[in-house]
Image (cartoon, rainbow, N blue to C red):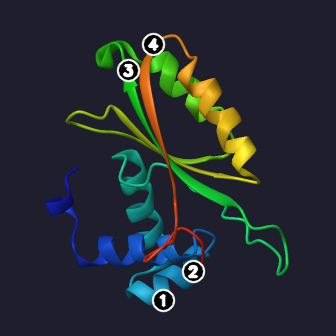
């Protein structure tokens, strides 16, 4: 299923679920103007076609809790076609909040949020020592202009 296969109602469903993935189907149905059953069928179809790949929890940090250190890590693999071991190892690191496979010179782009600069260094050390990783570049985030990851 491609983006142009989605109609207005599919897009409304995706938009509402992006805001709150726990929205009850009955509430969602009212918002998009369909019956509960028709809405459930649309969600099932979007899941079956991989448009909805997963539901996740974004934990809101309590006021006054520690500030996390954000960083971006670029990963260059030795063999980009056989790098699933690298991506599996990266996915197991809880501080990695995003990992994308890219075209072009950079193979993987990671965003990381850790409790300290030292922990970012530990994560970098783990990633850079993985078999299959040729090189990495780590960038500490100085400020954010747009951040839609946390509600």
Query: How far apart in space, not on screen, are marks 3 and 4 (Cα)?
Result: 6 Å
- Label 1 neighbourhood size at 10 Å, few (<14), some (14-19), many (20+)? few
Q: Specify the label residue 132 is tagged with.
A: 4
User: Relative to 9, is 114 above or below?
Assistant: above
Residue that carries the numbered disc 3 in the rendered image: 77
- Secondary structure under the numbered disc 4 in the rendered image: loop
Q: Which mark is residue 30?
A: 1
CA separation, marks 4 and 1?
50 Å
Secondary structure of the residue carrying numbered label 1: helix
Residue ID at (60%, 33%): 124
- Of residues 107 and 128, the one nearer the viewer is 128
Mark 4 surroundings within 10 Å by alpha-carbon count, few (fewer than 14), some (14 through 19), many (20 or more)? some
Residue drawn at x 51%, y 80% is: 28
Q: Count neighbours of disc 2 (C-alpha within 10 A) and say few if under 14, some if 14 to 19, many if 20 or more.
A: some
Instruction: Tell me the quarter of the picture where residue 145 sits.
Output: bottom left
Residues under numbered marks 2 and 1 in contact, where contact means CB atoms less than 8 Å apart: yes
Gap between marks 2 and 3 measured at Cα: 46 Å
Task: Look at the numbered discs 3 and 4 and tell me whether their residues touch, using CB distance below 8 Å.
Answer: yes
């Amino acid at each position: 299923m491609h983006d142009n296969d989605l109609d207005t109602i599919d897009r409304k469903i995706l938009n509402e679920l992006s805001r709150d993935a726990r929205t009850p189907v009955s509430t969602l149905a009212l918002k998009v103007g369909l019956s509960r059953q028709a809405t459930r069928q649309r969600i099932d179809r979007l899941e079956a076609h991989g448009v909805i790949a997963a539901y996740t929890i974004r934990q809101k940090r309590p006021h006054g809790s520690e500030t996390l250190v954000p960083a971006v890590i670029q990963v260059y693999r030795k063999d980009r076609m056989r790098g699933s071991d690298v991506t599996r190892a990266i996915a197991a690191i809880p501080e990695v909040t995003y990992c994308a496979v890219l075209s072009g010179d950079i193979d993987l782009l990671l965003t990381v949020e850790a409790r300290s600069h030292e922990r970012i260094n530990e994560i970098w050390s783990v990633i850079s020592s993985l078999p299959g990783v040729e090189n990495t570049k780590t960038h500490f985030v100085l400020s954010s202009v747009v951040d839609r990851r946390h509600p």
